[in-house]
């Protein structure tokens, strides 16, 4: 049990958040299969992205960290230069590592086995297995199931497909695109709703000719990637905790510097505006990030649904906390994907916020949240899910009296190892 900081004093503070998790994973994967060296600045050294580095090293890619600049330096091996690993490839807690690498490894000339921790072992893999099998891949789940560990056997060749995605998932889309690079012909992926587009953007940066028309993405196999320097901006999903804190706490102003601003990720900013939050976004000259300032606000309820959901999927737990403090009843729909994240986030958020005195009803695909709750002391748990753990710490800041104890606080290391230090630096005595 970790005692969380409660009853936050009013502050005016600037901070920055660690590098974007999705971009960091992709930089290592694409750097590994590129020709020549790639350098990654602002890489997120969280457990998930470190798992990706370790797996790529196991596949024979030299990856070093510059101890002065913290840049990750990748000596790319090209698409056909990876080597078989004699060991199991451990993806830890990271769905992104397992799903993206299943697409890459499906086209390689050797056998691979991808394993994960207890949480990842429960996450659905049929969503990547099915399209990859249609491309000719030989991929199997544990004992014939659609769950990890995954065993991938080499095949003669992969063939291009036209695939209409049944779920909005950037991980599935990316797995198909990584397989498509190794397939004969043109692959077309059609998204159900636009999901984060970092793979498409980074493939283009690495010199791949990839066409995006609305929800259609087209890519020809057999293209070569060229090593690049990548600047990873701060992760908006990590910034989200401080955006919420700045809005919810009294007499507070927080400025979060260098937050990645990508249209496929910025749904939370639209929600803050719809809820009447005071928000200022100052774009930086680099064209990829912004400094975002939030101030204490009286929030009002909103409805969040449809194509907005994939653009804020990882922020929904902290948005749920915002809704507990807003005026009126907030409805969050079309978010059944939350049930298959690191834990069932629909249940976890409702149970833990209710333990703190909120009024959250879990539905089949989201929540109905009655606003205006005064949060109170409780013992809560993260279920080992980083995003639940961080949301609960921000909730605890709103608790005026008594203690909030969190079971399994170390899970924040998955995406934000410095999270508690930053909270302490802003609100601690
Ligand atoms: C991610 C995609 C999303 C997101 C996850 C990271 C990615 O998952 O929730 O944290 O980097 O591609 P889905 O593809 O399952 O929606």
Image (cartoon, rainbow, N blue to C red):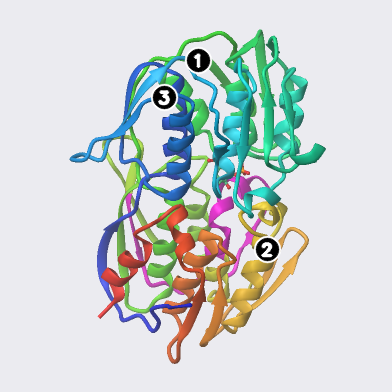
Look at the image and tell me whether residue 177 can be seen.
no
Look at the image and tell me whether residue 122 can be seen.
yes
Q: Nearer the viewer, mark 1 or mark 2?
A: 1
Q: Secondary structure at mark 3?
A: loop
CA–CA distance in space, label 2 to label 3: 39 Å
What is the crowding at mark 1: few (fewer than 14 residues within 10 Å), some, or many (at least 20)?
A: many
Q: Are marks 1 and 2 in contact (CB under 8 Å)?
A: no
First in residue order: circle 2 vs circle 3 = 3
Mark sitting on residue 61: 3
First in residue order: circle 3 vs circle 1 = 3
In the image, the segment drawn in magenta is 291-319
Mark sitting on residue 79: 1
**What residue appears at the point 65 percent right and 71 percent down from the top-left corner?**
350
Q: Secondary structure at mark 2?
A: helix
Expressed as whole percent of the image width and height from the top left, the position of residue 82 reads 49, 19
Total marks in image: 3
Q: Is mark 2 within 8 Å of ligand 1?
A: no
Q: Are marks 3 and 1 in contact (CB under 8 Å)?
A: no
Q: Is 298 left, or right, of 117 in this rendering?
A: left
Residue closest to the eye, 246 or 345? 345
CA–CA distance in space, label 3 to label 1: 11 Å
What is the crowding at mark 2: few (fewer than 14 residues within 10 Å), some, or many (at least 20)?
A: many
Residue 240 versus residue 83 in the image, above or below: below
CA–CA distance in space, label 1 to label 2: 39 Å
Expressed as whole percent of the image width and height from the top left, the position of residue 22 reads 48, 40
User: Can you tell me which quadrant of the image ligand 1 is in?
Assistant: top right
Q: Is residue 1 magenta?
A: no
Tag 2 residue = 346
Which quarter of the image is occupied by the C terminus? bottom left
**What residue appears at the point 48 percent right and 80 percent down from the top-left corner?**
405
Q: Is mark 3 within 8 Å of ligand 1?
A: no
């Amino acid at each position: 049990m970790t005692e969380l900081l409660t009853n936050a004093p009013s502050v005016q503070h600037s901070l920055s958040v660690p590098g974007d998790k999705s971009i960091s994973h992709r930089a290592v994967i694409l750097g590994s299969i590129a020709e020549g060296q790639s350098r990654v600045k602002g890489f997120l050294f969280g457990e998930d992205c470190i798992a990706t580095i370790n797996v790529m090293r196991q596949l024979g890619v030299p990856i070093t960290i510059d101890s002065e600049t913290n840049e990750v330096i990748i000596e790319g091996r090209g698409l056909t230069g990876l080597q078989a690993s004699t060991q199991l490839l451990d993806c830890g807690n990271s769905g992104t590592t397992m799903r993206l690498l299943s697409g890459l490894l499906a086209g390689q000339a050797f056998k691979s086995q991808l394993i994960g921790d207890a949480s990842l072992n429960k996450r659905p893999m049929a969503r990547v297995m099915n399209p990859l099998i249609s491309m000719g891949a030989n991929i199997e789940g544990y004992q014939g199931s659609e769950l990890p560990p995954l065993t991938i056997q080499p095949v003669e060749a992969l063939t291009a497909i036209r695939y209409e995605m049944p779920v909005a998932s950037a991980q599935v889309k990316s797995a198909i695109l990584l397989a498509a690079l190794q397939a004969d012909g043109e692959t077309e992926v059609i998204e159900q709703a636009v999901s984060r587009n970092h793979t498409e953007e980074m493939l283009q940066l690495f010199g791949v000719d990839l066409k995006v028309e609305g929800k259609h993405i087209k890519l020809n196999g057999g293209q070569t990637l060229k090593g690049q320097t990548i600047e990873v901006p701060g992760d908006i999903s990590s910034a989200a905790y401080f955006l919420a804190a700045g809005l919810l706490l009294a007499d507070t102003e927080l400025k979060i510097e260098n937050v990645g601003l990508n249209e496929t990720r910025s749904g939370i900013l639209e929600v803050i505006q719809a809820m009447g939050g005071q928000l200022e976004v100052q774009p930086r000259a680099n064209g990829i990030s912004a400094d975002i300032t939030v101030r204490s606000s009286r929030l009002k309820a909103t409805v969040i649904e449809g194509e907005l959901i994939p653009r804020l999927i990882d922020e929904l737990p902290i948005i749920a906390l915002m809704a507990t403090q807003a005026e009126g009843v907030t409805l969050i729909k079309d978010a059944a994907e939350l049930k298959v994240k690191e834990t069932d986030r629909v249940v976890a958020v409702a149970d833990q916020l209710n333990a703190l005195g909120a009024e959250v009803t879990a539905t089949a695909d989201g929540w109905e949240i009655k606003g205006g709750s005064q949060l109170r002391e409780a013992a809560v748990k993260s279920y080992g899910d980083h995003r639940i753990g961080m949301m609960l710490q921000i909730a605890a800041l709103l608790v005026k009296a008594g203690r909030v104890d969190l079971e399994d606080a170390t899970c924040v290391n998955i995406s934000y190892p410095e999270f508690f230090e930053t909270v302490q630096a802003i609100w601690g005595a």
